[in-house]
Image: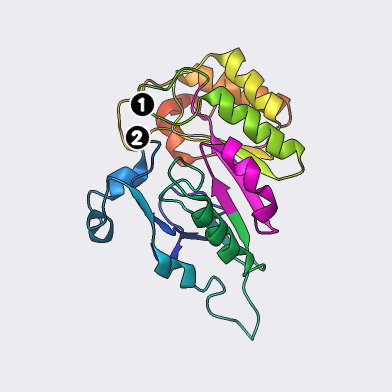
Amino acid sequence: MPINKSRGNMYTWVTHTHSHLYGRCAHRCSYCYAMRMRQWDPRLKAANQNKTYLAGKELEANYNGRLVNGEVVPRVYFLEHMNDLFAPGISPAWISVILSHARRYPHHEYVIQTKNPARAERYLANFPANHLIGTTIETNRDMSAVSRAPSAIERAVAIRNIGRAGHRIFVTIEPVMDFDLLALATILVDIRPTFVTIGADSKGTGLPEPSAEKVIDLLDILKMKKIPIREKHNLGRILGNRKEAW
């Protein structure tokens, strides 16, 4: 998709989004916002939704945008926000050319989020210099009924290894699903991410959700362990009147 300014329920620190990959993500998450967008966006509806493919024209996108007084204005790009760069079916050649595209514009920061960080580990040397790597951990429980992505434990181990290799990492718990408090807290504390984001199922897909009390207890543990939290506004639906108490 073309370069767009970040809007809606996107991460507040992201300024722009860009995807080189079109079509359906192999993870097949039932709650995926990108999948819902494909139902109404004409550009996406026209694409073949039975596979993922590289839109070569997107490799020509100019990440610098308009210069101000001859200077590049730094941006924060969320790459492949409509897909997963490291999902099954994405060829190594595609991964290489997409990362190479970003490296051509070193003035910016690049956010890459994947539910397959174990595969991302193999490409760390190819990432642009200024990058932030994230993974999603919605719960510590089995998610095979709603997603084909690797398990939460697999993601946790891989993103922890990436962080210990010196890369900035984050974990997003969105949409947060019902979880076992000590188990999920232990996973997150062991990862030691740069920060954690947490948000609710804003699309109303009927996922099992935790109580407000359980979410607040998790936030309190992370706070006690000095792990920064970037709470998303849609979490208020779960917290209700308990939000003020936290």
What residue do we see at 45% from left, 40% from top?
A: 88
* Nearer the observer, 100 or 232: 100
Q: What is the quadrant of residue 21 in the picture?
A: bottom left
Q: Position of residue 116 (x, y in %)?
A: 53, 37
Q: What is the quadrant of residue 240 in the picture?
A: top left
Query: How many other residues sit within 10 Å of disc 2, few (<14), some (14-19) or many (≥20)?
Result: some
* Nearer the observer, 218 or 165: 165
Q: Position of residue 136 (x, y in %)?
A: 52, 35
What residue do we see at 70% from left, 52% from top?
A: 125
What residue do we see at 60% from left, 15% from top?
A: 183
The number of callouts visible is 2
Is 191 contained in the magenta span? no
**Which quadrant is home to the N terminus?**
bottom left
Relative side of 71 to 2, left or right: right
- Residue 146, which numbered label? 1
- Residue 31, which numbered label? 2
Residues shaded magenta: 111-139
Amino acid, disc 1: Val
Q: Secondary structure under badge 2?
A: loop
Q: Nearer the viewer, mark 1 or mark 2?
A: 1
Label 1 and label 2: CA atoms lie apart by 8 Å
